[in-house]
Amino acid sequence: MSLDKKFEVCIIGAGSAGLSVASGASQLGLRVVLVERGEMGGDCLNTGCVPSKALLAAGKRAHSHRKDDIKGIKAYEPDIDFSAVKDHVFDTIKTIAPHDSQDRFEKLGVTVIRDTAHFIDPHTIKVGKDTIQARYFVIATGSRAFIPPITGLDNDKILTNETIFDLREQPKHLIIVGGGPIGIEMAQAHRRLGCKVSVFDMSKILPRDDQDNVKIVRETLIDEGIDLYETIKIQNIEHTKTGVTLNILDKKNKKSIIKGTHILMATGRTPNIENMNLDIAQVKYTKKSIEVDDHLRTNQRHIFAIGDVSGGPQFTHVAGYHAGLIIRQICFKMIWTKTNYKALPWVTYCDPELAQVGLTKHDARKKYGDDINVVSSKFDGNDRAIAERKAKGQIFVVTDKKGVILGASIVGSGAGELIGVWALAISSKLKINAFTDMIAPYPTLGEINKRVAGAYFTSKLFSAKTQNIVKWLQKLPL
């Protein structure tokens, strides 16, 4: 017998965005149906954030044994079982999976259907034999790896984030095409786990981040033995019995031939919108995304698109943010709620970590000209960083002329944790003096946030004018 019911909310896609909407709407008393054709938890749990961070953790642990920066501790080359490391990766997924499981959501009152959904009219979808109608639809189908049209590239002979974690054989030479966060994280993880690694990008690596901070990451990767080929063009790719060959041109049109055993494509994402019959639903879309307004609403007012498929910033925390906006609009009728990415943080989990929120100093100058202030502080002035031999790094903070915080850029140990307070500051429209008024525990890496804020006032505080004021005040009685 097929299901033939009407729901208040129908969610297509059980990734981070869809699960958050399903959980919230169901617990607020709405009748919710959740449709997922693949694994519960989507890309983040199964092929993205979770496995990549587990692999990075393994690489970081291995690399810690090679360090000889603390006297009295002898460095050595660790014995790495690459296949067993993958067991660690899947154990991590298995531990987190119950939180995203079908069983958990059914206990929350959500009807879960594991099949492919497609629209048969703007208010109805077909899922297998089931016909489902809903007052609201939320499309949260996510994205997958984009494969560029490179001459000679065979899609059946490449790795993507969907297949790299299943690889049990240790690559002798992993070629990575793409120098964004995914490419850089996987490059460092595999290098630290004993693989030779080469990264290729038509631009510079990590182009969205502060380039002074990226320079530190670049130097670290090169020091660890990763070969970086930036601002190059891949003429063609040849798949051979022993692996893969890249024919490239650098910016001076010099030709090079690079051979590897495996190739990972990390060249961006493309939305999962095929076979949904969006035309029948009369929903507008492009090859890059489903078109939405600032409310995440499509041209059909009862249909929303959230997460990667909506074409906005592609981060798991953005998916969760989108879900909150949908809950406000559907459940509480706060229809004025809009997206605002002004205080959106992001982190590349390389070592040292690279974190950003708000405007970089380059973007701030582009937008405001000279009406900004930029202050900085280095990790080598932080006592905790010195003690732990983690003194490679720096922070930049950008404010307007009145001291209102516009952005923060951090590279260094724990940058992903340190950036959070700056996201709060920007979302709360705080001035930088909020950090000078803060008492920071000693010794912590977090003290660098207070130190950089202090740098904002240094020139004024210790100026000749201030010194004269202090001298005059000394004439007054206690």
Image (spheres, grey):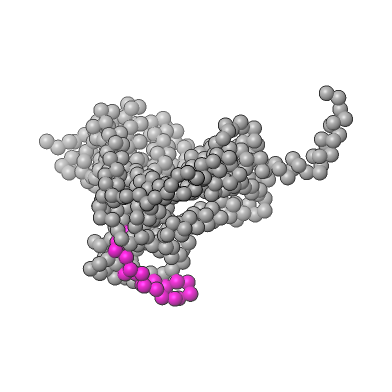
Q: Residue furthest top?
A: 478
Q: Residue at x 54, y 41 (%)?
A: 387
Q: Is residue 467 left or right of residue 97?
A: right
Please say whether residue 197 is one of the residues in the magenta stretch.
no
Q: Nearer the viewer, residue 250 or 139?
A: 250
Task: Pick whichever, 442 or 42, lies toward us.
Answer: 442
**As displayed, is residue 339 above or below residue 261?**
above
Q: Examine the image and state in which quarter residue 335 appears.
A: top left
Residue at the front extreme?
A: 72
Left or right: 423 as drawn, with respect to 33 = right
Residue at image location 26% in from the left, 53% down from the top: 167
Q: Main secondary structure of the magenta part?
A: strand
Question: In the image, which residues are magenta?
Answer: 245-265
Q: Residue at x 73, y 45 (%)?
A: 459
Left/right placement of residue 425 relative to residue 82 reads: right
In the rendering, at what x and y percent does residue 330 appear? 38, 34
Question: Which residue is located at x 71 percent, y 43 percent?
Answer: 458
| Residue placed most toward the observer, 126 or 212 | 212
Which residue is the extreme one toward the left? Answer: 1
